Structures are given as structure tokens and as C-alpha cells.
Image (spheres, rainbow, N blue to C red):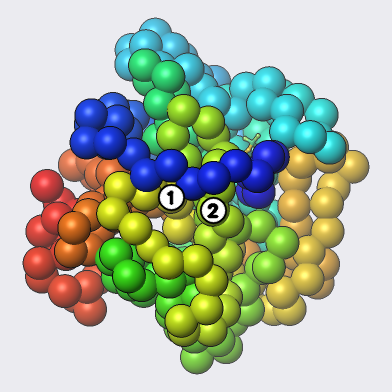
Amino acid sequence: MKAPFSVAIQPKTPAEADKMRVAGRLAAEVLDFITPHVKPGVTTGQLDKLCHDYMVDVQKTIPAPLNYAPPGHRPYPKSICTSVNHQVCHGVPGDKVLKHGDIVNLDITVIKDGWHGDTSRMFCVGEPSIQAKRLCDVTYECMWKGIAQVRPGATLGDIGHAVQRHAEANGFTIVREFCGHGIGQRFHEEPQVVHYGRPGQGIRIEQGMIFTIEPMVNAGKRDIRMLGDGWTVVTADHSLSAQWEHTVLVTADGFEVLTVSPGMPAVPAFVKPANALAAAS
Ligand code: MF3
Ligand code: CO
Ligand code: CO
């Protein structure tokens, strides 16, 4: 998602980063909460309702997607995004029944105390095909290849290149129309964090910046289409698509992942131990 307005990037203060740490953890905890419910027979609408009630009643957070209306979009009608199989992102929950072998991305954004936390994971419903599992795994690695680039002095091109290279080395393609984004008191802020590019290009990363890395990776061609609901994005060739997302703070010497929770999947071994520790703290 792109930031609706172009404004100068304001690195967050340590006090603001603390607020974002809380929001980030809460967003990740919604994913932990919903995990046992992602089973054959459940509808995406039921997952939305369960998450909505958990956010509002248990966490006392606000589901950021609900009625979110960036320029050029009608208000988003639900509290989470559920993107199944060939759906790339922003899948609108409804009557769709999850069945054995489906893959689904659940994307959660909460607002706590005015600050946003944004994270998504892939879920396999029952046993996935080898191809579907490989797409989910490679996309997870793509997100972490990008995160591992984050430090003051690196560029956004370094992130995009690392993500793109890993996807394409595995025969997959990167969606270009949607990107990661700065995040804070607004859902989508500058900068745009695209998931392709060249090392050294783009703006320089500074300590205190907070942005998401959220690659969308297609098993087939990279082209996408928008459904008639004005939100759900699908692959043009109907090939499978996967996405993972974390919200990341730039620290003095690297990164800290803010969207951490007890149930998050393990950090890949290629992420340096020092940074992996930061991610787990
Ligand atoms: N959570 C998505 C992102 O990562 C944005 C969803 S916008 C919505 O940027 F309105 F569809 F919820
Ligand atoms: Co996001
Ligand atoms: Co998101």
C-alpha cells in the first residue's frame, strides 16, 4: 500500500519507538490468537469476526483496516485482510470457506494509543502442495533477506534488491504495484519500501525510521488485477501468491523487529546472530 500523501520522513524518538513496540507486539499476538482457528471449513468472515472481537474486546486495540479509505479507494469493509491462494493482498473476508490445501495470508494492523503495528503471515490449511509450501517458505525468506539489510547507511535499494534476488533465484516473481511503507501515527507513511531494485539506489536508511517489509511473491507472472470489490488484488494468471510482513525499527547498528510474539515462526539461520537477538528481544 502506498502512503496517501508525500511528507518528509520523521525518524521516531525513543519514546515513540516504545509506543510502536507495544502496537507491534499486539498485532503479532492477534496472529498467534487466530492460528488454531485457521482450519478446513472455517470462513474468512469467521476469522475476521474472531480477530475483530479479540482486538476490540481483549486487547482494546482498534482494527486499522475497518473503514480505512485512502484516496481512490472506497472504505475497507472489514477488520483484517484474508488473501487466499491466487489472491495477492487486501482480500476482503466473506463467505469463502477455507479448504484442505489452501494457503492464506492474514494481515493484521492494530492501533494502540494512536500508534500502528502491521504484520502478516501465511497459513497452510491442512497439508499444502509441495509448490505452495515452497512459495510460502521462499517468501518468508525473502522478507528476512530484506530485513537483514536494514541498518543506518544502507539504502532502500539494498532491501529491494535482496528481496527480489531471492524470489527470482527460486523462479518466482515480485509484485511491483504494492510495497512496504513507513508507519507510525498513520497507517501508511513515507517512505515506500519496494521489494525490487538495485543495491545503493533509493533513499538512505536512518536510525529511528520505522517501516514495514512485506513482499508479495507470485509463483507465476508478476502481473496483478483488482477485483470488482475495489480491494481484493489477484494474480492476472491465477497463479498462487504469498506474502509475509513485519514492522521494523532502524537501530544504531541494525534493526529491531517490532511485530514479535511467542508464536512467530523462527528467524532463518542466515540472519546474523546479533540481529536475530535484536529481533527476539
Ligand atoms: N495491512 C496492509 C498493509 O500491509 C494494508 C491493508 S489496507 C486495508 O499495508 F484497508 F485493506 F486494510
Ligand atoms: Co503494511
Ligand atoms: Co499489513
Residue drawn 14% across the image and 55% down it:
278
- Neighbor class of circle 2 (other Cα within 10 Å; few <14, some 14-19, many 20+) is many
Find residue 71 and report its image quarter.
Answer: top right
Q: Amino acid at mark 1?
A: Phe
Q: Position of residue 23 (x, y in %)?
A: 33, 29
Label placed on residue 191: 2
In percent of width and height, residue 248 lies at 34, 51
Q: Is residue 86 above or below residue 26?
A: below
From the top left corner, tell me how far across and down residue 264 is, in percent.
Answer: 27, 49
SS for tag 1?
strand
Q: Give the residue furthest to the top.
A: 57
Mark 1 and ligand 2: say if the CB distance to the nearest ligand atom is below 8 Å: no
Q: Are marks 1 and 2 in contact (CB under 8 Å)?
A: yes
Along the line of sight, the residue nearer the viewer: 204 or 254: 204
> Does any portion of residue 64 appear in the rendered image?
yes
Q: Is residue 25 left or right of residue 252?
A: right
Q: Work out whether 164 lies above or below 87.
A: below
Point out which mark residue 39 bears: none
Q: Sequence order check: which comes first, mark 1 or mark 2?
A: 2
Q: Could you give the CA–CA distance between mark 1 and mark 2, rounded to whole angstroms?
A: 8 Å
Q: Residue drawn 66% across and 68% down? A: 175
Asked whether the viewer can see residue 100, the reply is no
Crowdedness near tag 1: few (<14), some (14–19) or many (≥20) residues, C-alpha within 10 Å: many
Q: Quadrant of residue 110?
A: top left
Question: Which x, y percent locates residue 174?
Answer: 62, 73
* Residue type, numbered disc 2: Pro
Residue carrying label 1: 211
Q: Residue shown at 57%/75% (left/top)?
A: 196
